[in-house]
Image (cartoon, rainbow, N blue to C red):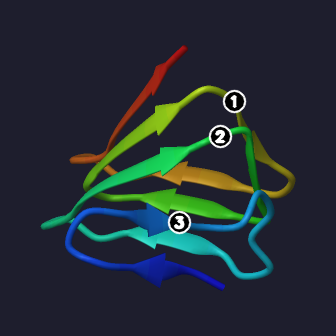
């Protein structure tokens, strides 16, 4: 479950579904967070810990930046 308003976005610590960042997207996840499978074709920024339990695929235009 996630909640979004103009100022605040929340997400669970563990995702049940795969996460895909499209080529034209910039995405921010705050961890620690666990994801089954991750595909990054755009830009993914992660604050703190990222745990992918399955496959991680980074496309030719994909960028992952982990901070903290």
Disc 2 designates what residue?
31
Q: Residues within 10 Å of mark 2 (few under 14, many from 20)?
A: some
Q: Measured from the top left, where is residue 5 in percent x and y?
A: 30, 78
For label 1, the SS is: loop
Q: Nearer the viewer, mark 2 or mark 3?
A: 3
Badge 3 element: strand
3 or 23: which is nearer to us?
3
Q: Which mark is residue 4?
A: none
Q: What mark, if any, has residue 49 been given in the picture?
A: 1
Q: Report how far apart the C-alphas of labels 2 and 1 lie in the structure.
A: 5 Å
Residue 19 percent location from the top left of the image? 56, 70
Of residues 10 and 54, the one nearer the viewer is 10
Q: Is residue 30 above or below residue 6?
A: above
Horizontal side, residue 42 vs residue 39: left or right? left
Position of residue 58 measured from the top left corner of the image (x, y, whole percent): 45, 48
Task: Look at 66% across and 85% down and name the residue there.
Answer: 1
Give the labeled residue for mark 3.
Answer: 10
Q: Are marks 1 and 3 in contact (CB under 8 Å)?
A: no
Does the CB distance between marks 2 and 3 fall below 8 Å?
Answer: no
């Amino acid at each position: 479950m996630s909640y979004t308003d103009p100022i605040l976005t929340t997400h669970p610590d563990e995702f049940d579904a795969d996460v895909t960042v499209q080529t034209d997207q910039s995405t921010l996840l705050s961890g620690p967070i666990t994801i089954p499978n991750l595909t990054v074709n755009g830009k993914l920024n992660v604050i703190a810990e990222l745990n992918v339990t399955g496959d991680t695929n980074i496309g030719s235009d994909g960028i992952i930046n982990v901070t903290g």
